[in-house]
Amino acid sequence: MLSHLFSAILIGSTTVTASPALVSRAGVTPLSEEQVATFKPYALLARAAFCPRNRLETWSCGTACNDLPGMESVTAEESLTDAGWFVGYYPQFETIVVSNQGTEPNEIISSLTDADFFLAPLEPSLFPGVPNQVQVHDGFQRSQAGSAQAKLDVVNALIAKYGSSSVTLTGLGRGGAISLIDALYFSFQLPTSIKLKVVTHGMPRVGNLKFAEYIDTHLSDVSRVTNKHDPLPTLPGRFLGYSHTSGSLLP
């Protein structure tokens, strides 16, 4: 099922949200075959996050690793109860990669309809100064908070090791949602000279309209890749107070 979803993401029915004008948040822009090809590495990075820790840290996770050779200094964590993740340095793009594990489509649909779908303000200790009116999916927020410091520590270590000024975050479904919150967290924790790039695939709605507007204002490079037959981006429903962020096409 997972491989089929990634295949669907990378064919011509793929769309990406339009540039970050608030008035056009709901619009989508079809991608040409050439544009789809530019997003494939990010889909592979999202796919790799599903692999076991030992295979990630040796970068031997099958197709995703084989198609993106050369990943260095990978640190990975896996969990039976929460989202796994990995952080590494990808020399070809000269960027530090943060990829959060998503869930199978049938699993995320159920998780988005349980008690965790309630909106809640961001944790002030992680997001200082963010207004209480900016609210996110409580389950996504708790997942992000549980690994936030560990990922930040690895990112800082790789910045020191490689002198990188770029951090790229990606993930499928719930993994994309956690990566989006991670990016906002990093924007408070990392120097302003570090460029943050977010590319998600099949990402559900993460927060309310105030959150979407806050992301649009504070993160300049966010792309949401969506297949028109994928139900995940339609969840949680707008009637629950959720709204999608905008996204920007890759140059």
Image (cartoon, helix red, strand yellow):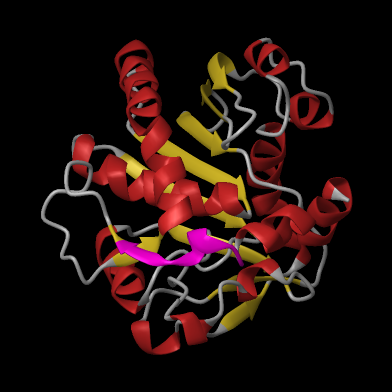
> Where does the image place residue 15, in percent across and percent down from the top left?
67, 72
Vertical comparison of 247 with 36: above or below:
below
Tell me if residue 2 can be seen.
yes
Q: Does the magenta stretch include residue 136?
A: no
Please name the residue shown 57% across and 28% down the image: 92
Residue 146, located in which quarter of the rendered image?
Answer: top left
Q: In this view, does 210 lie to the left or right of 119?
A: left
Front residue of this view, candidates 16 and 135: 135
Q: Is residue 21 left or right of residue 223?
A: left
Count how many numbered circles sit on residues in the image.
Answer: 0
Residue 136, located in which quarter of the rendered image?
Answer: bottom left
**Which residue ends up furthest to the front in the rendered image?**
115
> Where does the image place residue 5, in percent across and percent down from the top left?
82, 56
Please name the residue shown 38% across and 17% down the image: 158
Please name the residue shown 27% across and 55% down the image: 122
Q: In this view, does 104 lie to the left or right of 205?
A: right
Front residue of this view, candidates 241 and 12: 241
Q: In this view, does 13 lie to the left or right of 100?
A: right
Front residue of this view, candidates 21 and 243: 243
**Which residue ends up furthest to the left in the rendered image?**
129
> Where does the image place residue 14, in percent across and percent down from the top left?
73, 68
> Where does the image place residue 157, in percent across and percent down from the top left?
34, 15
Please name the residue shown 56% across and 21% down the image: 77
Vertical comparison of 66 with 241: above or below:
above
The residue segment tinted magenta is 113-120
